[in-house]
Amino acid sequence: MDVLYTFTKSLIDPVAIIVLLLAAGTMAALSKRKGRAALFLAPALVLLYGLSIAPVSGALCRWLEQDYTAESTVQKGRLDVVIVLGGGVVEPAETGETLPSVQTASRLLRAVQVFRESGAAHLLCSAKGIGRTSEGDVMAAAAERLGVPREKILVDPVSENTRGHAVEADRRFTDKTIRIGLVTSAYHLKRAEREFRAYFADVVPIPSDFLATRPQGIRAVDFVPNAGSLFKSAVAFHEAAGNLWYRLKRS
C-alpha cells in the first residue's frame, strides 16, 4: 500500500500533471484530431501559471500552516521529550559526507532551542531517509555538535514516514502521558500531530519553518510566475495528498 501511496503522490505533483497534459496536447496536435489539442494545452497553461504565482502558492501554504501561526511560547520544564522529524539529507559527491538538508537543519535548530528552553529529558531524532547514514543519526551528530549532551540524545534510524515516526515513538516510550514537543515544518505539522496524538495524550506542535509569508497586499510582481512559487505549490499538493491518504488508511 505504501508503494501505491508513493506512486500516486508522485503523479499528484503539479509538474507531473502539467507534463502529462502537455504530452497529450502535443500528441493531439500531431494527430488528425488537432482540434482536441486545446483541451489539454489550455489546462496545462492555466495550471502552470496559476501554481507559479505568489497569491496561489501563498494561499495553499497558509491553508496548511494557519493553525500554527500563533505559536505560544514553550515554558521551561513543561516538556518531557522533544521529537524532531527529519526532512531529508544531502550527500555531496566530492566529500562523501551525509549532511542535513536545509529543511532538516531548520527543524533541528528549532528542536535544540526548544530542548534547551523546556528542560526536556531527551531529544529524539527521528527518520531513516535514503542516505548512507540515517537522517536520525545525522541529526543526532549535529545536535551533539550544537551542545546537546550525547546521553540525552535518542535516535530513531528506522522509521520511513510520518506514521512510522509515531509508531516508533510509541514503541520507545511506554508512558503515554508524557508531554512531547513535536518539531517539524509548519506545513507538515497537521499530519504529524494527528499521528502522534493517536498514541500520546499530550503533544505540543512546534513549527520550525514556514512556507507562507505574511500578506503584504497585492503587487503587480506577485502575478509574475516564478519557480519558487511553483515549488511551494508542489509541496502543498504533496502534503494535501499525504493528509488524505493517512485519513483514508485510519478510517
Image (spheres, grey):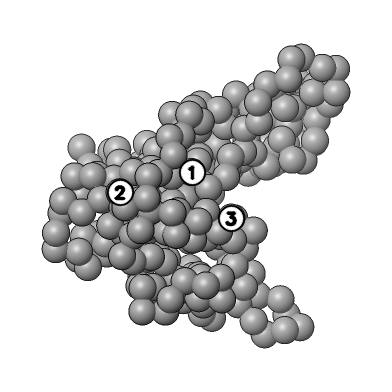
- Left or right: where 230 falls relative to 11: right
Measure the C-alpha gap from mark 2 to mark 3. 22 Å
Disc 1 residue type (three-letter): Pro
Q: Quadrant of residue 28?
A: top right
Kindly state the secondary structure of the residue where label 3 is placed. Answer: helix
Residue at the image point whose x is 59% and y is 61% from the top: 105
Q: Residue furthest top?
A: 218
Measuring from the top left, give residue 248's x and y in whole percent: 28, 38
Residue named by callout 2: 78
Q: Are marks 2 and 1 in contact (CB under 8 Å)?
A: no
Measuring from the top left, give residue 160's x and y in whole percent: 39, 64
Residue at the image point whose x is 48% and y is 43% from the top: 207
Task: Name the disc covering residue 106, or none.
Answer: 3
Residue named by callout 1: 207
Q: Is residue 173 visible?
A: yes
Q: Are marks 3 and 1 in contact (CB under 8 Å)?
A: no
Disc 2 residue type (three-letter): Arg
Q: Nearer the viewer, residue 88 or 250?
A: 88
Upstream in sequence: badge 3 or badge 1: 3
Q: Nearer the viewer, residue 142 or 157?
A: 142
